[in-house]
């Protein structure tokens, strides 16, 4: 039986064994998937697999099993590959069958050639996703994910610990298994090799043949590159000019971008899905060599190469900068909170021991969170109540084009002269798994790219700031907005923000048409007066305290809260989004009768929109207390909160005239 080191360090050897035992039976692919699925179920084995989110690419062994938590930023066209191919030895005429799945390079032994005319050749299809780390992923998510894996990695109570240590040395030291006869090259030497790929090719003749577009390219032995991707949008790639744009949606993002090759059920995934993939890491430098030669060649037949140079550059970047992952298993993630079980559907949430234990202590956690947010909002407990409801809101269904469950809050009355919004965002950032702070100004609206746009020259989707994963918290700061003129791009950006808030969709720009992409983004708007953007609920901030030093005050809040309590806040906000909710017929009838009575008493000010808003507040109030059905008590509390909120707005209107 293969040990843990085999399937972690050498997954292709496992695939080879299954392939050899089952050829020519086509079930071998299904058996490979089942094998790794079973392995990953054993004793938290998913945490044994090195993650590209935590470990730099150059510390990982090529062709080892890795995982990657990512968002699908773009989908390239499907590509054909040799699923099964046959090699022949010209001297002995000996023939050998090979599998091409999970590989970029078609391997053939010494003195062997690929027989392109073999009747045994099977041409298959795979889909390539361009994946990036989850945009706006909070630092605490990365830290806890890494520490969780580290604890299991160092868990001396685990009987397989020593096997795992030997199997996972790639996580703690750079692999040298491909260069046993010499010391590792310096970065400068690597750069020289990349600048002169012919040198690299000359030095590594022999074991692998690259097959592309019906042509057999030069044979190159796999070899490590030590070049690590930059932390920003652009990477200076020796083989690419201008610099390679990693196409991250948000500025300043860190982490690798990957070309993820999917072999099964790729139609179940779509752009902006958050995935966790397990697959074979491919960083073979032969890809960079061949792609460089193809771009530099002036003798290519235009009929054989339909891709433009720009498309080749983008779709085939150097593997050392944009590694490939050949997916064996992939799953959509409901959330990215590492403190919760990865998959937690409605049925599991009712029986899961973790959930039941946490729900038993929900009430004190809510009280602590309310107090914490009250201090963050300068002593305003009503605004803190609505902020909790906002943070647990989510789009749970769509009725025609109307998204149900969205709860965009406009927090007006925010101090203009201070950095209040900046510090409030930092607190929210410590509570939610993913977030982004959008500073709204005339300049930013006129010059930022909020809407993703199709680049037909490179045949890719250029990312925009609004290409975000589901349940991302977007904090829009209007407090610094001044008078000025919006240009055409600025108008489009403001319109896009309005559509995001109202319809929970972003219209991507495909030049000749717009394509709707539904989303589920929690939007919080901070403003001095009423926001220019639409919202579901306006709450006017009434500070009870004015700290002399805002930064010191906000920082002390975070340092005062215990890490264990902070983690409970994080679990609370993520878990309640996943709970189901319903209203019984009895309560529905009581609500209807109550609303009719309210209309009789005040027909001018009570509208159907008010009923919708109160039902929404009642929904999130119930969920915030861990109740999955609406009770009479929660309905009355929702009415009370709405009355207090509206009275505050009316009071502010009297003070400032018509401005709310």
Image (tube, helix red, strand yellow):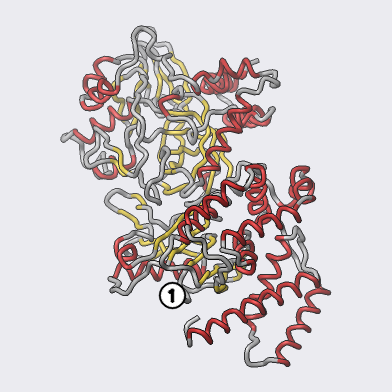
Viewer-proximal residue, 659 or 601? Answer: 659
SS label for mark 1? loop
Q: Is residue 655 left or right of residue 94?
A: right
Q: Residue at x 32, y 49 (%)?
A: 459
Q: Residue furthest right?
A: 586
Question: What residue is pinned by disc 1?
Answer: 532
**Residue 130: x %, y % from top left:** 42, 43
Would you place residue 93 above or below residue 222 in this image?
above
Quadrant of the snapshot with the N terminus? top right
Q: Residue at x 35, y 28 (%)?
A: 211
Residue 527 appears in the rendering:
yes
Residue 432 appears in the rendering:
no
Viewer-proximal residue, 440 or 396? Answer: 440
Q: Residue furthest front?
A: 548
Q: Residue at x 77, y 83 (%)?
A: 594
**Residue 2: x %, y % from top left:** 62, 16
Would you place residue 93 above or below residue 70 in this image?
above
**Residue 471: x %, y % from top left:** 56, 55
Question: Label 1: how many residues lie within 10 Å, few (<14), some (14-19) or many (20+)?
Answer: few
**Residue 153: x %, y % from top left:** 60, 24
Q: Residue at x 63, y 49 (%)?
A: 570
Q: Residue furthest left?
A: 298
């Amino acid at each position: 039986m293969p040990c843990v080191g085999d399937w972690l360090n050498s997954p292709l050897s496992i695939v080879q064994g299954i392939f050899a035992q089952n050829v020519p039976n086509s079930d071998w692919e299904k058996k490979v998937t089942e094998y790794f699925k079973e392995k990953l179920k054993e004793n938290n084995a998913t945490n044994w697999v090195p993650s590209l989110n935590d470990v730099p690419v150059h510390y990982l062994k090529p062709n080892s099993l890795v995982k990657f938590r990512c968002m699908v930023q773009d989908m390239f066209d499907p590509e054909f590959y040799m699923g099964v191919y046959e090699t022949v030895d010209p001297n002995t005429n000996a023939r050998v069958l090979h599998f091409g799945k999970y590989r970029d390079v078609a391997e053939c032994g010494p003195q062997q050639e690929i027989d392109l005319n073999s009747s045994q050749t099977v041409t298959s299809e795979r889909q390539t996703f361009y994946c990036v780390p989850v945009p706006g992923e909070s630092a605490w998510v990365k830290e806890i994910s890494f520490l969780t894996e580290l604890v299991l990695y160092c868990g001396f109570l685990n009987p397989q610990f020593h096997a795992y240590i030997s199997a996972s040395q790639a996580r703690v030291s750079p692999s040298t298994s491909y260069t046993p006869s010499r010391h590792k090259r310096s970065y400068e030497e690597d750069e020289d090799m990349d600048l002169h790929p012919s040198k690299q090719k000359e030095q590594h003749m022999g074991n692998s043949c690259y097959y592309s577009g019906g042509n057999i390219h030069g044979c190159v032995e796999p070899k490590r590159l030590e070049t690590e991707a930059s932390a920003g949008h652009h990477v200076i790639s020796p083989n690419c000019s201008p610099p390679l744009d990693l196409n991250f949606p948000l500025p300043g993002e860190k982490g690798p971008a990957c070309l993820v090759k999917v072999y099964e059920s790729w139609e179940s995934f779509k752009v902006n899905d958050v995935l966790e993939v397990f697959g074979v890491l491919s960083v073979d430098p032969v890809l960079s060599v061949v792609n460089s030669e193809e771009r530099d060649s002036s003798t290519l037949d235009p009929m054989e190469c339909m891709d433009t140079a720009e498309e080749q550059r983008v779709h085939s970047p150097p593997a050392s900068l944009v590694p490939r992952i050949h997916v064996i298993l992939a799953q959509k993630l409901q959330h990215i909170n590492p403190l919760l079980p990865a998959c937690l559907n409605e049925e599991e949430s009712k029986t899961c021991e973790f959930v039941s234990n946490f729900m038993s202590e929900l009430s004190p956690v809510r009280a602590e969170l309310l107090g914490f947010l009250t201090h963050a909002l300068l002593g305003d407990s009503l605004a803190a109540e609505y902020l909790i409801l906002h943070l647990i809101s989510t789009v749970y269904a769509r009725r025609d084009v109307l998204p149900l469950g969205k709860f965009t809050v406009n927090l007006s009355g925010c101090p203009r002269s201070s950095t209040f919004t900046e510090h409030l965002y930092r607190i929210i950032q410590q509570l939610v798994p993913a977030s982004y702070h959008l500073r709204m100004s005339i300049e930013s609206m006129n010059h930022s790219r909020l809407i993703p746009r199709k680049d037909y020259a490179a045949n890719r989707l250029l990312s925009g700031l609004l290409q975000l994963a589901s349940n991302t918290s977007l904090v829009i700061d209007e407090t610094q907005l001044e008078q000025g003129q919006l240009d055409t791009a600025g108008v489009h950006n403001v319109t896009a923000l309005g559509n995001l808030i109202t319809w929970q969709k972003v219209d991507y720009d495909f030049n000749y048409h717009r394509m709707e992409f539904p989303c589920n983004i929690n939007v919080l708007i901070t403003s001095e007066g009423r926001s220019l953007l639409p919202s579901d609920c306006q709450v006017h901030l009434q500070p009870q305290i004015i700290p002399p030093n805002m930064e010191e005050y906000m920082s002390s809040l975070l340092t005062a809260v215990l890490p264990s309590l902070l983690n409970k806040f994080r679990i609370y906000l993520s878990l309640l989004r996943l709970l189901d909710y319903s209203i019984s017929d009895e309560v529905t009838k009581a609500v209807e009768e109550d609303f009719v009575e309210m209309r009789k008493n005040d027909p001018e000010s009570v509208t159907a929109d008010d009923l919708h808003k109160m039902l929404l507040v009642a929904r999130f109030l119930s969920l915030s207390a861990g109740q999955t059905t609406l009770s009479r008590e929660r309905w009355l509390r929702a009415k009370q909160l709405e009355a207090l909120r509206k009275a505050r707005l009316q009071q502010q209107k009297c003070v400032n005239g018509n401005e709310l």
